[in-house]
């Protein structure tokens, strides 16, 4: 089944709403969305770095601010 949305005629808000609807639908059955093997590898590496004190957790507001600064 293929559904085509008129993306060129949709506002940004309409596009974001449709994306949210898609994510909500996918989240109903997360087992049906396979996680790539590299996700596990990245998580294991991050856990190792945290255990070794080379990385630390930060709160969400700080993370958002770091992302904003990096993408200006």
Image: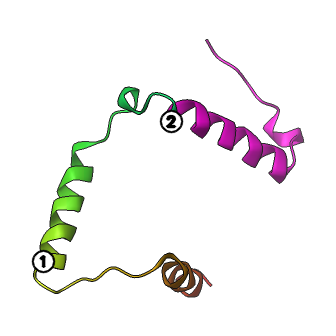
Query: Is 36 located above or below residue 63 in the figure?
Result: above
* SS class, disc 1: helix
Residue 11, how many percent across, how many down?
87, 48
Residue underneath mark 2: 27
Badge 2 element: helix
Magenta span of residues = 1-26
Q: In which image quadrant can residue 65 be found?
A: bottom right
Nearer to the camera, 67 or 58? 58
8, above or below 42, in the image? above
Disc with the residue nearer the chain's start (2 vs 1): 2
Residue 61, image x, y percentages: 55, 81
Quadrant placement of the C terminus: bottom right
- Magenta stretch encompasses residue 5: yes
Q: Position of residue 21 (x, y in %)?
A: 68, 36
Residue 55 sits above or below residue 26 on the image: below
Q: CA distance from mark 2 to mark 1?
A: 31 Å
Left or right: where 69 falls relative to 19: left
Give the residue drawn at x 57%, y 88%.
69
Q: For the N terminus, which image quadrant?
A: top right
At 83% across and 51% down in the image, what residue appears? 13
When asked about the image quadrant of residue 51, the answer is bottom left
Locate residue 15 relative to residue 61 in the image: left or right.
Answer: right
Q: Does 39 sit above or below residue 48?
A: above
Q: Main secondary structure of the magenta part?
A: helix
Q: Is residue 50 shown left or right of residue 18?
A: left
Q: Check contact, mark 2 vs mark 1: CB within 8 A.
A: no
| Foreground of the two, 59 or 20 | 59
| Residue found at x 60% / y 37% | 24
Q: Please tell me how crowded label 1 is: few (under 14), some (14-19), or many (20+) other residues with Cα within 10 Å.
A: few
Q: Residues within 10 Å of mark 2 (few under 14, many from 20)?
A: few
Q: Which mark is residue 14?
A: none
Q: Report the residue marked by disc 1.
A: 51
């Amino acid at each position: 089944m293929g559904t085509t949305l008129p993306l060129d005629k949709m506002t940004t808000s309409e596009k974001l709403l449709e994306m949210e609807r898609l994510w909500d639908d996918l989240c109903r059955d997360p087992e049906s969305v396979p996680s790539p093997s590299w996700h596990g590898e990245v998580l294991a590496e991050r856990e190792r770095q945290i255990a070794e004190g080379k990385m630390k957790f930060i709160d969400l507001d700080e993370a958002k601010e770091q992302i904003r600064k990096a993408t200006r």
